[in-house]
Amino acid sequence: MSLMPKSDSIQIREVWDHSLEEEFALIREVVDAYRYIAMVTEFEGVVLRPIRNCNLPTCGTDKYCIWQFNFREFNVNEDAFANDSIELLRQIGINFKKNNEKGIDA
C-alpha cells in the first residue's frame, strides 16, 4: 500500500499574479493545522513521504491540495540556465511565455 495519495486525488493549485492574494488567504486558513511546510524551487516531485496517511490539506474539497507558484522574472530567451532543467520543466508543463505574461512579481 502506497503512503502517497493517488495523483488523481491531488489538486495542483496554480498561483498567478491575479490569484496570489486569494491563494495566500487559503494557505493562512490551513497552515496552522500542519507541522511542516515544504518548498521545491525547481523540480516537482516528492519532498517528504508521510509516515501515516497523506499529510496535505484538502481546502474544503475532496482532493489534497498543493500549490504551484508561477513567477515571471525568469526569461528563457535572456537568462542563463541548464538545458536539462528547462527541458524537464517544459515536459511537466511549465509554460515560460505564460509565466512571463501572468506570473507573480518576485
Image (spheres, grey):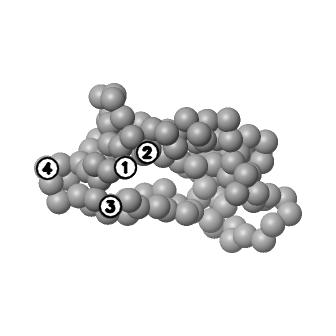
Estimate the spatial distance between the alpha carbons at disc 2 and disc 1, rounded to whole Å: 5 Å
Disc 3 marks which amino acid?
Tyr
Q: Circle 1 sits on which residue?
A: 31
Tell me if residue 40 comes above or below residue 71 in the rendering. Answer: below
**In screen coordinates, is 51 left or right of 66?**
left
**In screen coordinates, is 29 left or right of 76?**
left
Q: Give the residue drawn at x 47%, y 61%.
A: 39
Q: Circle 2 sits on which residue?
A: 28
Q: Can the viewer see residue 8 in this picture?
A: no
Q: Circle 4 sits on which residue?
A: 1
Disc 4 marks which amino acid?
Met
Q: Give the residue drawn at x 69%, y 67%.
A: 83
Indicate the secondary structure of the residue bearing disc 4: loop
Indicate the secondary structure of the residue bearing disc 3: loop
Disc 1 marks which amino acid?
Val
Which label lies toward us, 1 or 4?
Answer: 1
Could you say which is closer to the camera, residue 61 or residue 91?
61
User: Which callout, 2 or 4, points at the residue further toward the start of the chain?
Assistant: 4
